[in-house]
Amino acid sequence: MFNPTYIADIQHLETQESMSAELTGAEITVRCLQEEGVEHIFGYPGGAVLFLYDELFKQDKVRHILVRHEQAAVHAADGYARSSNKIGVALVTSGPGVTNAVTGIATAYMDSIPLVIISGQVPTHAIGLDAFQEVDTVGITRPCVKHNFLVKDVTELAATIKKAFYIASTGRPGPVLVDIPKDVSQQKTKFAYPERITMRSYNPNIRGHAGQIKKAVQLILEARRPMIYTGGGVILSNAAARLTELVRLLRFPCTNTLMGLGGYPATDRQFVGMLGMHGTYEANMAMQHCDVLVAVGARFDDRVIGNPKHFYNPDRKIIHIDIDPSSISKRVKVDVPIVGNVSDVLDELIKLLELRKEKPDQSTLDAWWAQIDSWRERDCLRYDRTSAIIKPQMVVETLYKVTNGDAFITSDVGQHQMWAAQFYKFDQPRRWINSGGLGTMGFGLPSAMGVQMANPGAHVACITGEASIQMCIQELSTCKQYHLPLKIINLNNRYMGMVRQWQEFFHGNRYAESYMDALPDFVKLAESYGHVGMRIEQPGDIEAALQEAFKLKGRLVFMDFVTDQTENVFPMVPGGKGLSEMILV
Amino acid sequence: MRHIISLLMENEAGALSRVAGLFSSRGYNIESLTVAATEDSTLSRMTLVTTGSDDVIEQITKQLNKLIEVVKVVDLSEGNHIERELMLIKVRAVDNDREEIKRMADIFRGRIIDVTDKSYTIELTGTGSKLDAFVEAMNRTTILETVRTGASGIGRGERILKV
């Protein structure tokens, strides 16, 4: 029988209880987020997280951003983290909430991005009984997280969340997941947030070994054909300024990986461009032919050095600085490994070099620069600027010009990603946001939402293609809800461009399933979500259109550029080949 | 090639699956794996037998060290160590075989721990190759069942793996 008095009594009772020192798991979780200084979390509600959402509803310190798919929640938290040096936080429900989030988690894991993902779980008594919306979250995510926890006891919740934030952001960063069963979010206990946490099993090494750093300095001073090759580790450890200091001090050439762009100013003369599969001719040739290679926060990935057998050069000595010992001598044997935080190690290295007051032989260095300049003359990134059809490279170049090189650029995955990396010159770290390791199509738009949340007022552009953008297109709705004035640069060539390029080069022009048929009218689509849509078909219209788009300050503008269908990304090191075996334009 | 790796890890649910998952996801060989809590009940000690080139073993120890719950890792095969494995083997033992099997068990310092009219169950401890030799020696009779624990290892003398 419905008895309103009775219900009122219970509510009264509950209020009284919450006034005592005991808090529910849900309250504790939200309090922990507040204690960690979390301002934004990206998520999607569901049965197992209802108590958590109820607590979020009752406070206003942590702002929740409602996405339209859990994958986007994690990508948004990821973009937020990459562009701000804060920890990104996502909240998803059990079962499909988690499985949808897995792509986002794996993306962050491959690129070492600090995230905390809170997932709901079915009540502890239902775990293992194939309950509604139950999956083995800890099991499913184990291979793609830095660590994960299933909290079965509310008294361990606060300490576990503290550990999650600590693990995510220290050492080599990465995503950490905390799985909270529904009953744990209801149970009560006293709340005390630990000030600090120590773990006997987890003590990342920060400072590099002094003896190893000395050896590195010696090798650097003896170098005749030096090269500095840096990756995402420089960005993650906020070492861009130190790296720049070191490179200028030594007058060595510097290249960045796809993940490392912005680690060294791209407009500087000592920057030889990105290296790797679609790196510049000069960067790849210098990598192959240098005699001392300083690798900083990079991991000799297959897309970066190609075939390790071909890369091997007995005359080349390699110094490798990385916080993760397992990244060292994994694909390439190195001579001087230095395990430590990139920023700290570079500091020591600079100090020692300044103490030594010596410099590498300047005349051999001049000869090496002359060699690099002759490689530069190949002008490997040239393209047809007189084309009557829009060349995608020109769009990126114009975007660079219109934004004064100062925008945050996110991208999806494929040809457009490579053109963005090649033609947008990043002078600052944390401005280039892309899925490097996992190569996740669908990353661009949701990560741009996170970037904009972390950097209100900044110009944020998402360079994408008509295939990638459709993998998370639903987020146009999120952008509408939160008034995110993103500029979406859709390089629309009606193909999965990179797939098509490989099919052209390696599969006899058989374009199996790589044609994007039945495309939507992107202008109308954008308009249906309440945004501005533009279609640009003439090369002469690119600049004016971009300028107009950036003038629409409060609006999301979806710019559909109709580009050359046959354009390819050059240079290209075919899979399994060596760095000096590039296909050139 | 063959390495015996010992590790101490937090005695927590899921720690074992992280190690097993690491080996399967990175394609490392795993010959045997044994694990149990230590005298300090917050710690488990695991002994892993694996094979691989020096590079692979280096990666294995690094990757194991990287697991958050792993406290310490040591490659026992880098120095002097002792390893032992326990086997329980049930064989058909009838007529004249009974005496012969008893003798054989004695030679290998095994103990018969269960007897029926038709079978013996023998307990045997030693290195893996000793157990292999015993299985080989028992081949003349009918082996009904064997169960082996996989190797456990410990460093010799002052080599100690402790937190």
Image (cartoon, coloured by chain):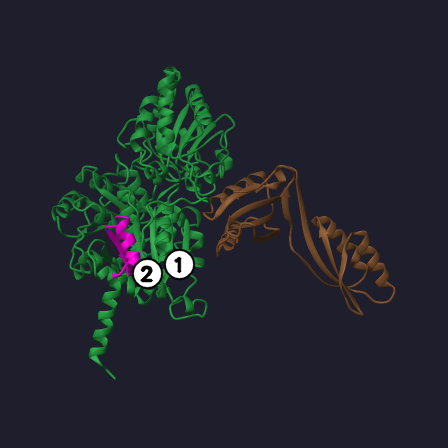
Q: Residue at x 68, y 54 (%)?
A: B86
Q: Which mark is residue A286?
A: none
Does residue A208 show up magenta in the picture? no
Q: Which residue is mark 2?
A: A25
Return the disc, 1 or 2, that comes first in the chain's sequence. Answer: 2
Q: Position of residue A109 (x, y in %)?
A: 39, 48
Let me know if residue A490 appears in the view. no
Label 1 Cα crowd, 10 Å radius (few <14 / some 14-19 / many 20+): many
Q: Which chain is green?
A: A
* Colour applied to chain B: brown
Circle 1 residue: A151
Q: CA distance from mark 1 to mark 2?
A: 10 Å
Choose between A415 and B50: the one closer to the eye: B50
Determine the secondary structure under disc 1.
loop
Quarter the C terminus of chain A occupies: top left
Residues rendered magenta in the picture: A20-44
Left or right side of B103 for A51:
left
